[in-house]
Image (cartoon, coloured by chain):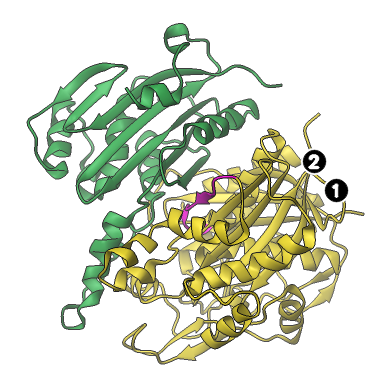
């Protein structure tokens, strides 16, 4: 049985600003992502030192998911929230850094702590660990944001009862250019975004 | 009524052969693709890996195309797909999708410092190059979810066909042995000094490998080789570079997949497991299987034949497991000597005849991911 699904909340992170459900919740003067992400972490008083070990893609995905998931996660029960993220550049930002560490044979120092982030799905692992989500997760790559696929695949997970809620979206990071758009979708009725789609919210 | 899902075409390109038949023959002879290599452009020291001869790839590719623009991995992927697309007769229309599974794609393109080469390192570009060779009408879907990618794509394709978005999905999975991944696994001290020995007492790590595999997943039962009846992919939520000690994610993935398949664990006649031969992975799998009372189900890891082929492994091992089921024969878990995991598991020590009606394929990977898919033989 195919049931209707509803967008519950959404978040956009780009241009030194975080917009949650259409409202700017954090904005600073232009700076690099390392500084922006650190300031955002402090602003929201997140207590999670592992954040500082993450690569930029994981930090970006983590910050977005933090503001969407923290209000809906319950410590008392299992939270069946699937993670479905996608981007264009995979983990290339870290791949390039790792490649540099092995290119010069005179200065060869491959690091396991960097190598592990040369997989795009590591950011899903980071979010799963943070919120203790023992749930479905998959990472996709597309040339550009593909709202149709994201919406279809999220609905499949919800309608086949493989997830109660899906956190889906786009987390793109390369060379300090970034954009994250994440939203939560479930079968729970929510009229707030009934005239919106993932695509219209992404382009806002 | 939920649609039934079938795999109707399979193929693979590996050091053991460029079609299914030659691969199965090599496995039955006990031949492994893992050899000692001394290529300093890949590793400062000699290493064991399962590598395909580039000359063989080029010779085979020349028979289907004279175009010089394709990378080595693209040629391997096209070679895996070409016969099955042709043989299936499936029209590449809006109801036919294309899914590509890989972890690192054309990562070797990063060695060259040019914009064009850097562009080729993008996974969507790899997928487009392969898709355009055949003329797919739908946008390629790339799955890059570490070492579960190759089996996760079977699950994703099943779900998408069940939702009636598509009727047919061609899936290709592939990864190469590169300096990039060799140095990384070596930095993790996860490489074996000898050909890998999954589940064995003296196992010390992985042997890396390269391969491509391709399948057609379809709602059409005609010519079906196997039916896909249950799947799940659950994260451990424990550690990004090591498996859960209790095997929680794998345990839940198998449990969910069996539930969807509506069969009990004791119905499984065979398990094609991940078995990378790292101390932690194999131990974790044994714990998860034991928690599910699967200690008697015959199990193998095909890593002793192919090495760990990363994003290809799940699909390659599925393709071989399908042959195992249809031949009613269990293939040996190559490299195994003496049991080296704390829980009892029933390792297949030599090739033997057995009736296989249901089998399970599993995989686990970095990021805490796990996938389990249950298959049923067509009788």
**Tag 2 secondary structure:** loop
- Give the percent coordinates (x, y) of residue B235: 49, 44
The residue labelled by disc 2 is B4
Q: Looking at this view, is A51 or B312 the one in front? A: B312
Q: In this view, does B228 lie to the left or right of B57?
A: right
Q: In this view, does B186 lie to the left or right of B56?
A: left
Disc 1 to disc 2: CB gap under 8 Å: yes
The magenta segment is B138-147
- Give the percent coordinates (x, y) of residue B322: 77, 63
| Residue B255 magenta-highlighted | no
Q: Looking at this view, is B180 or A80 the one in front? A: B180
Q: Mark 2 lies on which chain?
A: B
- Name the residue at 62% across, 59% down: B134
Looking at the picture, does residue A9 appear above or below residue B348? above
Q: Looking at this view, is A102 or B184 the one in front? A: A102
Q: In this view, does B146 lie to the left or right of A164?
A: left
Looking at the picture, does residue B142 appear above or below residue A83? below
Quarter of the rendering containing residue A10 = top left
Looking at the picture, does residue B153 appear above or below residue B286? above
Chain B in the picture: what colour?
Answer: yellow
Rendered green, the chain in question is: A
- Confirm whether residue B188 shows in the render: no
Q: Looking at this view, is A21 or B368 the one in front? A: A21
The residue labelled by disc 1 is B221
Given the current orientation, which residue lies at the most extreme right position? B379
Quarter of the rendering containing residue A29 = top left
- Confirm whether residue A31 shows in the render: yes
């Amino acid at each position: 049985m195919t049931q209707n699904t509803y967008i519950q909340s959404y978040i956009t992170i780009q241009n030194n600003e975080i917009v949650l459900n259409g409202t700017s919740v954090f904005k600073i003067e232009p700076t690099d992502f390392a500084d922006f992400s650190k300031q955002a972490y402090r602003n929201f008083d997140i207590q999670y030192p592992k954040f500082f070990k993450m690569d930029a893609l994981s930090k970006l995905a983590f910050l977005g998911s933090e503001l969407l998931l923290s209000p809906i996660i319950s410590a008392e029960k299992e939270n069946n929230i699937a993670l479905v993220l996608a981007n264009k550049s995979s983990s290339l930002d870290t791949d390039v850094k790792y490649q540099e560490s092995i290119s010069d044979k005179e200065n060869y120092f491959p690091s396991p702590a960097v190598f592990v982030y040369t997989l795009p799905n590591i950011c899903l692992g980071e979010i799963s660990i943070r919120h203790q989500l023992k749930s479905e997760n998959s990472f996709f790559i597309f040339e550009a944001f593909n709202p149709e696929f994201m919406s279809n695949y999220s609905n499949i997970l919800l309608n086949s009862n493989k997830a109660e809620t899906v956190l889906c979206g786009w987390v793109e990071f390369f060379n300090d250019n970034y954009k994250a758009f994440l939203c939560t979708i479930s079968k729970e009725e929510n009229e707030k975004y009934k005239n919106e789609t993932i695509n219209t919210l992404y382009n806002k | 009524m939920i649609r039934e899902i079938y795999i109707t075409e399979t193929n693979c390109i590996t050091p053991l052969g460029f079609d299914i038949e030659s691969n199965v023959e090599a496995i039955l002879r006990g031949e492994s693709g893992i050899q000692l290599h001394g290529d300093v452009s890949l590793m400062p020291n000699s290493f064991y890996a399962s590598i395909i001869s580039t000359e063989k790839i080029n010779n085979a590719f020349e028979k289907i195309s004279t175009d010089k623009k394709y990378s080595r991995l693209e040629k391997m992927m096209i070679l895996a797909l070409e016969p099955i697309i042709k043989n299936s007769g499936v029209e590449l229309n809006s109801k036919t999708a294309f899914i590509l599974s890989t972890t690192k794609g054309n990562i070797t393109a990063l060695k060259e410092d040019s914009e064009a080469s850097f562009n080729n390192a993008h996974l969507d570009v790899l997928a487009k190059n392969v898709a355009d060779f055949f003329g797919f009408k739908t946008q390629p879907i790339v799955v890059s979810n570490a070492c579960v990618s190759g089996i996760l794509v079977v699950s994703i394709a099943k779900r998408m066909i069940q939702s009636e978005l598509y009727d047919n999905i061609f899936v290709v999975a592939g990864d190469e042995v590169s300096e990039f991944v060799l140095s990384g696994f070596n930095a993790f001290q996860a490489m074996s000094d000898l050909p890998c020995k999954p589940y064995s007492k003296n196992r010390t790590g992985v042997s890396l490998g390269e391969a491509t595999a391709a399948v057609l997943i379809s709602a059409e039962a005609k010519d079906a080789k196997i039916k896909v009846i249950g799947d799940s992919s659950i994260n451990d939520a424990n550690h990004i570079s090591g498996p859960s000690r209790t095997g929680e994610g794998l345990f839940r993935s198998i449990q969910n997949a069996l539930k969807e398949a509506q069969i009990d664990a004791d119905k499984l006649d065979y398990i094609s497991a991940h078995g990378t031969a790292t101390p932690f992975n194999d131990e974790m799998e044994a714990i998860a299987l034991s928690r599910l009372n699967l200690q008697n189900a015959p199990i193998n890891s095909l890593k002793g034949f192919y090495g760990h082929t990363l994003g290809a492994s799940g699909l390659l091992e599925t393709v071989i497991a399908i042959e195992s089921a249809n031949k009613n024969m269990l293939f040996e878990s190559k490299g195994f000597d003496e049991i080296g995991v704390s829980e009892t598991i029933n390792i297949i020590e030599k090739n033997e005849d057995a009736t296989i009606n249901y089998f399970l394929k599993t995989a686990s990977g970095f990021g805490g991911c796990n996938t389990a898919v249950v298959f049923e033989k067509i009788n």
